Amino acid sequence: MLLIMVAISCGEDEPDDNPNASIQFNFAFEVDGEALDYGQAYLINDDVVSFDVAQYYIGELSLTMDNGSTLNFDDQYLLAVPNTSARADAGENVGKTITKVDFNVGVSPEENSQSEMDFTEREETDVLAAQDPSMHWNWNTGYKFLRVDGDVDTDGDGVVDTGIAYHIGSDALLQALSVDSNIKIDQGDNSITFVLDLADFFANVDLSSEIDTHTGNVPELAQRLVNNYSTSISIE
Amino acid sequence: MLFALAVFCFQSCTSEYVLDIPNHFPRPIIPDENRLTQARVDLGKKLFFDPNISIDSTVSCATCHKPELAFSDNVSISAGVNGSRNKRNATSLINTAFLREVNKDGGVTKLDIQALVPIEDKHEMNIPIVKLVKRLEQDEEYVSLFEKAYGNASFIYATPRALASYIRTLIQGDSAYDRYLLGDQNALSSPALRGKRLFESDSLACRNCHSGYDLTDYSYQNNGLYQDSPDFGRALITLDSLDRGKFRVAKLRNVAITAPYMYDGSLRTLSEVIDHYATGGKNHPNQSQHIKGFVLTKSDKEDLIRFLESLTDSTYL
């Protein structure tokens, strides 16, 4: 019953170790369709904002092929960070088309509980190990599933002046997404890009007044942002 | 010569550190993977008093957890690096070894990684653990101490565990009240004994929450400090609005020397604390039914304070 072991390796510009067929997972961050640059000022809902951290965990990733078979990446997590990528072997699937991409935004309860293994016990190369900027919560058990940090202009002079931080986590807010796709797997390199558009993500948020959620302190805002995943995360 | 050193270390470093646990106490919670050894406790103690583990090398754990104050602080909110202040009063670290959930809201489920909170918090030491361990790895003395204590384990793994090991040794159970419990009828003065009776009375109901060897049942309760608690407390962890304004019932051991009181240090004296309970609280929607107010004479109040003072343990003073 054990299917193909699929290993994901992470890093920037890794050498292609499978000349047959591989999938590279890319992580794109945008604001209104324009590539995100840390530190640059954007206008979202009439508020001037800039960002300096935007990242999230992808878990329980599963790719469904046009013949109904699936390629599962159980127990493996991707950390979506601007300008990074991860690569997996797709050898057996050449010629098929990926019609659906299923994944969680966040970390499953088992790993999130920190009971079997916590983030200080993991190998440095494990995306669930301690990161900088951090993706673990220290005051609360578990991970930040998604975090976006930056600054916003609150006094209307067009210059950012106040920190913003949206840190979403806790088991109750683990969110499964299922996104249709049409990606043919050819010999050689193939790529799947997860795109998070921050303008869509904050569509119904008043950034200059709703300046943070560390989830438990403003759970309603965290839930609203989770509800926005489906309209702000797409697959290309 | 090297060989001799290694053998020496093998014997002393792996030697178990035996805790002196009072008979009327439970067993401390110590995971197998972080058994107490002399080397771990020594490393933890060095880290605890070392300001170099904060971003600008100005703040150590002992800045806010002062040994002479039962490892607590005498200000409402202690200042971390750059004078920055968070929102809670520094807790006494005595008898932390017995906690299943750490911090006033129980957010940290193992003491072995609790130290990452102060290390990384921007109001405390403000240094990402990933950066701190790079700093420690440059220090030859630490490299050798880590090796003795945790072998090849990563510094990220070992740093909070060494601090937890040291904290686990901070055990006290020899106050006048303990001696009374263990059969010394003369350990408590008559006023303290009268205060004890008041504390345990149905009308004051203190014992409904403050029971056991450290005078806490470890539950999370709203004791009516505010009508609308600015700090959500337990609800930050559970996301349940019924937990808003609930905090772990505070230990009362050493309470006479750990002023100011409550999660934000807003009550300055034991007298103010008693006045708070006497008024019956501010009626937060989640306030416990046991906070219902009472009337005390001036001398009753003094007796109750004498009892609370009998909980001071001078082992570390």
Image (cartoon, grey):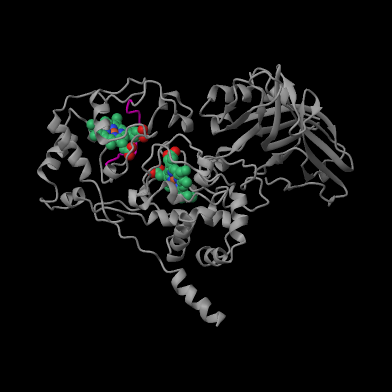
Q: Is residue A164 magenta?
A: no
Q: Is residue B221 magenta?
A: yes
Residue A196 location (% of width, % of height): 73, 29
Q: Quadrant of the N terminus of chain B?
A: bottom right
Residue drawn at x 34%, y 60% is B19
Residue drawn at x 62%, y 25% is A226
Residue A68 location (% of width, % of height): 76, 32
Q: Which residues are magenta?
A: B215-224
Whether A198 is drawn above or below A38: the answer is above
Residue B145 location (% of width, % of height): 52, 65
Q: Is residue B160 left or right of residue A228?
A: left
Q: Is residue A61 left or right of residue A221?
A: right
Is residue A127 visible in the rendered image? The answer is yes
Is residue B220 visible in the rendered image? The answer is no
Q: Is residue A62 left or right of residue B63?
A: right
Q: Quadrant of the C terminus of chain B?
A: bottom left
- The answer to which image quadrant residue B248 occupies is top left
Question: In this orientation, which residue lies closer to the viewer: B42 or A16?
Answer: B42
Residue extending farthest bottom: B1
Dominant secondary structure, magenta: loop
Whether A215 is drawn above or below B140: the answer is above
Residue A222 location (% of width, % of height): 58, 25
Picture mark count? 0
